[in-house]
Amino acid sequence: MTNKLQKTLLAGCLAFGLGLTTQVNAEELRIGYISPVTGIFAQVGKDMVDGFQLYLDQHGGKLGGMDVKFIVEDDQGKPDTGVTKAKKLILQDKVHMFIGGLLASTGYALAPVSTSEKTLYISSVSSADDLTQRQLSKYPYFMRTSWTSSLPHHPLGQWACDNGFKKVIIIAADYAFGYETAGGFQSAFEACGGKVIQKIWPPLGTKDFGPYIPTFKADADGIFTTMVGPMALQFPKQLRGAGIKTKILGSGVSYDEFVLPFMGDEVIGDVSALHYSAAIDTPANQAFVKAYREKFGKVPGYYSENNYTTAMWLDEAIKKAGGKYPGPEEFIKIMASIKLDAPRGPVELDDMRNPIENVYIKKVEKKKMFGYDKDELWNTVIKTYPKVSQFWTEGKEKFLAHPVYDRDYPPCKFCE
Amino acid sequence: MSQQQIKILIVVVVFGALALIVPYSGSFVVLLATRAMAFAVLAMSVDLLLGFTGLSSMGQAAYFGVGAYLTAVLATKLHFGLGWDFWLVVIMGVLLGAALAALFGLFAIRAGGVYFLMITLALGQCVWGLAYRWNSLTGGDNGINMSGRPNFGLDLTNEVTFFYLVFAFFAVSMALMYLLVRSPFGQSLAGIRERELRMQILGYNTWLHKYIVFIISGGFGGLAGVLWAHTNGHVSPETVVLTTSVDSLLMVVLGGAGTLVGATIGTAIVFGLREYLSTLVPWWQYVLGGVYVLTILYLPMGLMGILTRIGERVKSESKDERLEKLATKPS
Amino acid sequence: MGTQFWVVQAFNGVSYGALLFLVGAGLSLIFGVMRIVNLSHGSYFLLGGYVALSVISATGSWALSLPVAALAIAALGIVMERLFLRSGGALAQVRDVVIAFGIALVFRLMVGRILPQMIPGSFGSIIQLSLVTAVIAVPVYILLRRISATPIESDVLRQVLLTVGFAFLFQQGALDIWGGNNMDIVPPTELTQSIVVGGIYLPLYRVFMIGMAVAIGILLWLVMEKTRMGAAVRATVDDAQMARGVGIDTNRISMFIFALGAFLAALGGVIGGAFLGIYPGLDFEMLPLAFAVVIIGGMGSLGGAAIGALAVGLADNFGKALFPEVSYFTLYAPMVLILAIKPTGLFGRD
């Protein structure tokens, strides 16, 4: 028996035993998708997939004329499982690209896979700043269709200045995402004359804010919060319960549509910033919200919109490439040349492969929207900052010269 | 050949055959096998405590974590351990794991039974807290990305080469642990597991015995961590979470405690379910939970227990046959 | 920092401790009577919250959700205890049937997923599914009867791991039934107000938690100290063998205590649900907290659980307020210290 035959037989046996049968069709676009579909982040993972799937379904399962094979893999909310699954998608399913990754740590873990396997990775949710900033040069096959954590919070800092806020307390979850959102707010807010007078970092997952609320300085006129998931529901409730009426300036995720339907009326009037709101009053967004809600029974948040938009972006790019996938370098170039009109508004890539997009300052209101007949909480847009870059007004060189936002950067000059 | 030798031979042949087949079975399988082998070192270190000494540790992820973080921090901050100095990192990983265990052992060894379980849990969580919190060193929640695997003549970026390296570490670890449990020291550990009081009366310093095996187990945990870091190219607090400890404990019980091989089988099955079955069906978690419940209810000796039972049956049958022959022999 | 700061922080710590008491007391009692470290205790907490959410959405009554959820989870606890932790006789057969069907279903689904061509036809998929499952279940059942489960009463580690297995199953089950959203239990508006005492805002809900914990604590104490049942429980905690010797039905005691533990955890889930939210992962967040309570207080002691809960609540609260830098250790470091000094906890006995 020849060596090759032997190998094929062996592989065949094993493949049969394990049920691996991969048929590679030359005409189709194979897209791997990584999100946590089981475990504690399962709902977010589902929302991500649903966003992408909705676009596919609306377009007959085709992107840019190519049939799409859309393979979802479960990372179980663990970065190293994400890596394994990404390699499975690349090595076994021979995908052209992989998309997704929810947690910042997953994004960080997946980016090197794109480099070592020379396969395009599109981060459609994961927002760790440095991936498209100081570390980008390591990842030539990486791009983002979502946001950097600090991107929407620079404008929020500016907005706070413009609306008379002088002294603000920052309370944000004690991990990189918290530091980056808060850092973005602080640097912009202090650049226009505001003062951050206190920074508090409760551990991720804190639900009892009893220890922190009494330590708040009394002379603050605003509180910036980054609360994720279940934290977001409890903080405003406990803050108001403790009799503190100071205005809240929330990071986007503290009030996004994933948590909003489960919040009480005490959040009405709270302000937050993000690159998407389900209440953006444009025909494109209204159509998206209605289609999504009809299919999945809930109002889409940015997890879904980001992935819907990613699919839309791919659609345009494949079309522009002539109905085929031209390889990662070429494809990134094509993606970068597209100016997209997404539900969230106009989007395009900057030269660090992160979107330039609108940032919406939003206020929670209870009202009827898009013809739905029930009073619900919506993130009404009260101001739009158009075409915001991840470098805000600072310019790329100057921005990249300072370190990534961290627990101690920017330093708290006005604390004590 | 003695029975022991036959057993060893079987294990060597089976693992040798696996090592030969795996590289031909598709890159994803190579990757899974590498991960499982690296993790199996951790599971065996748990078995050393659980199966051979009777200590159920719920904090083994701590040693695993320090080994992994050590590797990642040295590689990214000092560019150390990416050439021949990889072997130095291995030694340092083992020593760091052992040192941490030496510290933790001072707290933990006094306690017995459930309390040992609880205190190791608490200690493990302290290390998790540190990994999460010590941002400047560990990168906090983002973790640390490593830029590549070591290259010292052998290019470990090649998945198959790396598989063989991990396999070698795995085989050597297993052999060393086997020698340890077969040694007089190991025999007295078994004595402690069965009847600690009696051993004390016989004049053994049982605390010291347990302390030493705790440290050795920590060393292997550290080694597993070093391998794990290079397997994934990424280290995050997720490496140190409580479920890593619980998983390793379950793997040992699933395969059969006190056999070392069982720990390996358990690891293979759990990895198979978590990372392979999960590519096929979304309800893999029911299967995993079900497997645990079933094993514990029906197979107290784990999967290896089945083999032992079959072995015993075969033995007793052949004995019966011999007796029969004796009986029917014309006198 | 003025007096006001200390008063508010102490109040917050005590109210958090009150919630922890509800979770810890059950865990402690179960351990005391059965010597079982129940790692699905966090799951009872979470499931209690979920059942309450269902009750509230169906009937709109928060008050009704408290007893319904607690009783439902107590029933679940009884099933788990009878079938899996203490099984013998007829119940063992019931268990084997349940498990055989489980295995058969998984097997059938797996074959259908991996080798679909192996499954003949598809006449009314549900009927086909259940028929095939039943056919597979028979040999599995026979096999299980032959192997026959080994009793696990005497094996601490196997009990622990069995309850972990259930915790995994419950987690995924809850996810499939209730979905993965972050939800919140909304108590009646009267309880969401604050009262102002001497310029300090005291959220009524926290007062309510303290009240509930005290009431339940007293009730438990009365049951344990003043009733025959309680006396029997105490005797079993002290020495199960002796208790059996004097004619106490420890088997029934163990069922009662397991149900009570599950009841208390679920009650904690409903009460805590308005304070912490209800979401996937809460089960494994509550578990270490419950352990901290029991470890510090000592397992098997009701008074210990109360002291432990108060200690954890206050330590966690003041630790986070005064030394936020080390907030990840405010829970575990005291636990390690106490265990290192007194391995059986403050009030525990071996």
Image (cartoon, coloured by chain):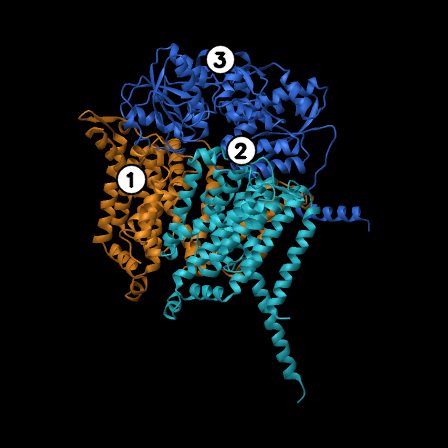
Chain colours: A blue, B cyan, C orange
Task: Say which chain tag 2 marks.
Answer: A
Residue at 59% in and 22% down: A310
Residue placed most toward the observer, C202 or B56: B56
Of badges 3 and 1, the one in the foreground is 3
Which structural element holds mark 2? helix
Q: Is residue C31 left or right of residue B301?
A: left
Question: How many numbered marks does the figure carry?
Answer: 3
Residue A92 in view: no
> Is the C terminus of chain B in the top left, top right, bottom left or bottom right quadrant?
bottom right
Residue placed most toward the observer, A174 or B325: A174
Where is B288 relative to B179, above or below? above
Q: Residue furthest right?
A: A1
Q: Are marks 3 and 1 in contact (CB under 8 Å)?
A: no
**Residue tagged by mark 3?**
A393
Residue at 30% in and 66% down: C245
Neighbours of disc 2 within 10 Å: few (<14), some (14-19), many (20+): many
Q: Position of residue B62 (x, y in %)?
A: 45, 46
Task: Say which chain tag 3 marks.
Answer: A
Q: Quadrant of residue C138?
A: bottom right
Q: Amino acid at mark 1?
A: Ala
**Residue tagged by mark 1?**
C315
> Is the N terminus of chain B in the top left, top right, bottom left or bottom right quadrant?
bottom right
Residue B314 in view: yes
Which structural element holds mark 1? helix
